[in-house]
Image (cartoon, rainbow, N blue to C red):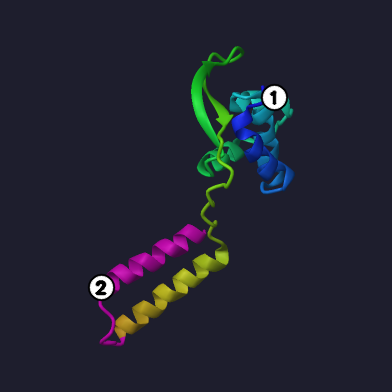
């Protein structure tokens, strides 16, 4: 079923290449065949690696698809969420994933703050033990 209200959204998002390949595949499938569940989508694309599942959360966070109901899977008996496209034309930008480089910069900045604290910099306000704890947490996140 093709919806008039989402024709413009489809044209802009798919035809103008505003989505990554996998996101576009999920969006297009839901546009033409929705509402559908994640398991139905995986089956449609014969996806054994679950590479389509994360795209649902991304598209939902972008405001391009939404949950519209629940259904019980025929094979598993589990309750699954039905998703369908929205009329949103411009996706909500997703937050940038933090890179290792970003994390290293944060650790270095925390270490600089600790150094300022330990050498008695009058501009530093904080607890040195909290700074050490913050640095340790950042390093632990990297491992």
Which numbered disc, 2 or 1, marks the residue that appears first in the sequence? Answer: 1
Element type at mark 1: helix
Tell me the crowding category of disc 1: few under 14, some 14 to 19, or many 20 or more residues within 10 angstroms, Cα based: few
**Are the two marked residues, 2 and 1, in contact with CB atoms closer than 8 angstroms?**
no
Tell me where residue 102 appears, x and y as whole percent.
Answer: 52, 67
Q: Is the stretch drawn in magenta largely helix, strand or loop?
A: helix
Name the residue: 36% across, 82% down.
115
Tell me where residue 16 appears, x and y as whole percent.
Answer: 72, 47
Tell me the crowding category of disc 2: few under 14, some 14 to 19, or many 20 or more residues within 10 angstroms, Cα based: few
Q: Which mark is residue 43?
A: 1
- Against 106, is 143 above or below? above
Element type at mark 2: loop
Residue, far front: 4
Q: Is residue 3 magenta?
A: no
- Against 56, is 109 above or below? below
Closer to the camera in the image, 95 or 27: 27
Tell me where residue 101 appears, x and y as whole percent.
Answer: 56, 68
Closer to the camera in the image, 10 or 111: 10
Q: Quadrant of residue 2?
A: top right
Q: Nearer the viewer, mark 2 or mark 1?
A: 1
Q: Which residues are magenta?
A: 119-143
**Image side of residue 126 versus residue 134, left or right:** left
**Image side of residue 91 versus residue 115, left or right:** right
Name the residue: 56% across, 36% down.
87
Q: Which residue is mark 2?
A: 127
**Total count of labels:** 2
Q: CA distance from mark 2 to mark 1?
A: 54 Å
**Image side of residue 89 versus residue 15, left or right:** left
Name the residue: 29% across, 68% down.
130
Closer to the camera in the image, 40 or 87: 87
Which quarter of the rendered picture does the N terminus lie within?
Answer: top right
Q: Quadrant of residue 46?
A: top right
């Amino acid at each position: 079923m093709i919806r008039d209200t989402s024709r413009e959204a489809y044209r802009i998002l798919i035809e103008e290449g505003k989505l990554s390949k996998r996101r576009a595949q999920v969006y297009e499938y839901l546009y033409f065949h929705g509402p559908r569940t994640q398991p139905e989508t995986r089956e449609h694309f014969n996806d054994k690696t679950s590479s389509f599942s994360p795209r649902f959360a991304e598209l939902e966070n972008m405001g391009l698809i939404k949950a519209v109901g629940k259904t019980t899977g025929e094979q598993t008996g589990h309750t699954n969420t039905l998703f369908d496209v929205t009329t949103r034309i411009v996706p909500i930008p997703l937050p940038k994933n933090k890179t290792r480089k970003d994390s290293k910069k944060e650790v270095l900045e925390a270490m600089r703050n600790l150094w300022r604290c330990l050498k008695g910099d009058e501009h530093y306000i904080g607890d040195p033990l909290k700074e050490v704890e913050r640095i340790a947490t950042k390093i632990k996140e990297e491992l």
